[in-house]
Image (tube, grey):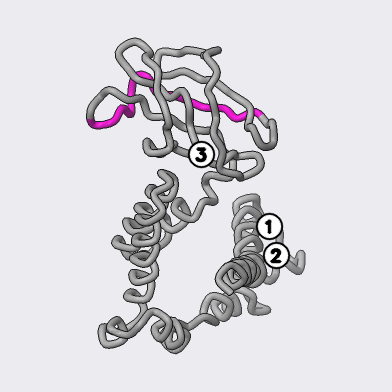
Amino acid sequence: MRRINPGSIISHIKYGNLKIPKNIQCECPGCRKTTEFMLNANYQSSKNGIVTECSCPSCKKSAVFIIMTKEDLDEHGEYADTYIYDPQASKHPINQIETLPNIPKDLIRAYRSALNVYQSRENSATAVMSKRVIESILKHFLDEKSNAQPLSQQLEILPKHVDLAKPILSLSHLLKTDDSLYRMLELETEMDYETSSLLMDLLESLIEYLFVLPGKIEVTHNKIAKKFN
């Protein structure tokens, strides 16, 4: 489930004492494009909320929306919280970083604010908050003297302050020949389902760390460079 930011709701209609969304601009869980959804009036009601669906204008796939009519109202008690069914929502960066240890709170706040203003199509505010996210990341790793330098110089010295090899080197302790995990991989001992799940998480993280993230950064870098050259 992915909560729809109030700024992404273009228009509302009355539903009893509440205002519920009629038009929503958000990312489609099917094609991942940001598009405008016009919610159908064929609601399936329950005591806690209503469910409706509509087709994505881009990929034509159906998207399911859940609107809370009893709980989770905003501070004014007038607008209903709205969610879209998105199986990939748990993999969104904001959901990932909030569960990780040692993540600076100001970084989470800045990144969430950047997401909110981006979804509201406030481009200038997105630029401001994006700069604040970068500054928060660098501030976490660099000393205060470095923080006074331009962002380009801070990024240049960042690898000197961050042990980028540490996540990979830490795996060496898990895969020693006399370790339990190594024996399971060699089928010398039996692996239970919980360990299998953890192993799949490890594989996904390895692939993302070594292939997906460097690839995404390179692709995005090339697109930005091409746009401004």
Is residue 209 toward the left or the right of residue 15 in the image?
right
Name the quadrant of the C terminus.
bottom right
Label 1 to label 2: alpha-carbon separation? 6 Å
**Labelled disc at residue 26:** 3
Q: Position of residue 43 (x, y in %)?
A: 52, 14
Q: Residue at x 49, y 55 (%)?
A: 93
Amino acid type at image mark 3 = Cys
Q: Which residue is mark 2?
A: 184
Q: Nearer the viewer, residue 192 or 152?
A: 152
Q: Is residue 179 above or below residue 67?
A: below
Residue reaching furthest to the left = 76
Q: Secondary structure at mark 1?
A: loop
Bounds of the magenta segment? 62-75
- The image quadrant of residue 37 is top right
Q: Marks 3 and 2: CB-CB under 8 Å? A: no
Is residue 72 toward the left or the right of residue 217 in the image?
left
Q: Marks 1 and 2: CB-CB under 8 Å? A: yes
Q: Which residue is mark 1?
A: 191
Q: Position of residue 55 (x, y in %)?
A: 63, 27
Q: Position of residue 24 (x, y in %)?
A: 48, 31
Q: Is residue 200 above or below residue 149?
A: above
Q: Nearer the viewer, mark 1 or mark 3?
A: 3
